[in-house]
Structure formats: C-alpha cells, structure tokens
C-alpha cells in the first residue's frame, strides 16, 4: 500500500484551486505550470453531468409515479401501464400534460444546477435520444403519434424552460 502511494505521488500531484472550488489531478511533469482552464473545464463538465442526471432522474421519478397513480385512477389497479391493454385518450392526455409540466421542472433543475446554457441543451438531447430509443425498441401500448410527439415536445420544453431559467437568474 505504501509503495503504491509513493508511486502515485511521483506520477501525479494534487493541485487545489480554492477560488474555483475543486481539485485537479495533473501529472508531475506539468505540476509547476497548472493550466487553470483545464481544471475549470473539468469542474464545469462534472457540474453539468450531475445537473443533467438530477434533472432527468427527477423527471422520470415523477413520470413513473404519475403513471402508476393514473393507472390506479383509470383501471383501479396498481399494474404498470404496459401490463394493461390499450390506454384511453383521457389517460394519455393526463400523462402528456403532467409530463410536460415535469419537463419544465427538469429543465429548471438542470439549469439551476448546471449554471450554463449547455446543461439544458444536454438534457433535451438526452430526452430526445431516450425517446427515439423507446420508439425504436418498444413503445408498449402507446399509440405511434404519442410515442413520436411526447419526446420531441418534451425535449424542446425542457431545453427552453432551462434557457428561460438561466435568463431569469442572469437578470437578478
């Protein structure tokens, strides 16, 4: 264990930049000339990854929970939607409406945590990619129009709500 620690200290040096609020690991040869831009970019990248993950996961938890509640209301059962037959139009409309509200919330969460316009853009791209994947692999008992419209409009909604959040916080 001690030999590994010594080898690690020889190969790498921990550089702390307190004003930026994070630590960078750089190789020992370039330890004297730390490139602050690289360290800053690394910190921003991790912040955006965490922001997108938090926004997407919060939206998905709410969507799945709402889906279960709507299934309970419409079918008086706690079964998942794909275990039931075709879904009625009122169920699809309620799920679409709440999904768009959750997309707005996810965009705002992502923008608030990411603090850059790239964060809601990445969230929108992730939502669109997941929607395309679901459409190609298995859309369950959703109608084709629903499986196409919801990911596109949801991604646009999340992205622009994130942009609106960033615009609101910049003016303050």
Image (cartoon, helix red, strand yellow):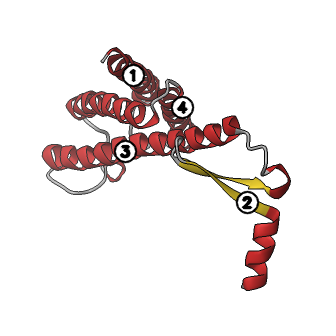
Assess whether mark 4 and mark 3 are in contact (beta carbons under 8 angstroms): no
Q: Which residue is mark 3?
A: 60
Residue at image point 33% right, 48% down: 61
Q: Which of the two residues, 116 or 154, is positioned nearer the viewer here?
A: 116
Q: Nearer the viewer, mark 1 or mark 4?
A: 1
Figure quadrant of residue 166: top left
The residue identified by callout 2 is 13
SS at mark 1?
helix
- State which quarter of the image contains the C terminus: top left
Q: Looking at the picture, does residue 46 appear above or below residue 125?
A: below
Q: Earlier in the sequence, mark 2 or mark 3?
A: 2
Say if 11 sits above or below 53 in the image.
below
Disc 4 versus disc 2: nearer the observer: 2
Q: Secondary structure at mark 3?
A: helix
Q: Earlier in the sequence, mark 1 or mark 2?
A: 2
Between the C-alphas of marks 2 and 3, the distance is 40 Å
Q: Where is mark 1, residue-wise?
A: 166
- CA gap between label 3 and label 4 equals 16 Å
Q: Position of residue 37 (x, y in %)?
A: 68, 35
Tell me the element at label 4: helix
> Which residue is at the front of the view, 4 or 152?
4
Residue 122 badge: 4
Disc 2 to disc 3: CB gap under 8 Å: no
Q: Where is residue 86, by image quadrant?
A: top left
For discs 2 and 3, the disc positioned in front in the rendered view: 2
The structure residue drawn at horizontal position 18% and vertical position 55%, both measured from the top left corner, is 77
Q: Residues within 10 Å of mark 3 (few under 14, many from 20)?
A: some
- State how far apart marks 1 and 4 are (Cα): 14 Å
């Amino acid at each position: 264990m001690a030999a590994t620690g010594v080898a690690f200290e020889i190969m790498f040096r921990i550089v702390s930049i307190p004003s930026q609020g994070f630590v960078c690991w750089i190789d020992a040869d370039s330890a004297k000339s730390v490139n602050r831009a690289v360290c800053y970019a690394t910190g921003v990248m991790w912040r955006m990854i965490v922001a997108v993950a938090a926004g997407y996961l919060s939206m998905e938890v709410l969507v799945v929970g709402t889906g279960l509640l709507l299934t309970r209301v419409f079918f008086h059962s706690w079964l998942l939607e794909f275990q039931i037959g075709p879904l009625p139009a009122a169920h699809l409309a309620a799920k679409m409406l709440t999904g768009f509200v959750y997309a707005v919330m996810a965009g705002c969460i992502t923008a608030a945590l990411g603090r850059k316009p790239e964060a809601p853009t990445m969230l929108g791209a992730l939502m669109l990619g997941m929607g395309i994947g679901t459409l190609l692999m298995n859309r369950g008992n959703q109608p084709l129009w629903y499986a196409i419209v919801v990911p596109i409009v949801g991604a646009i909604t999340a992205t622009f709500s994130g942009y609106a959040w960033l615009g609101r916080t910049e003016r303050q």
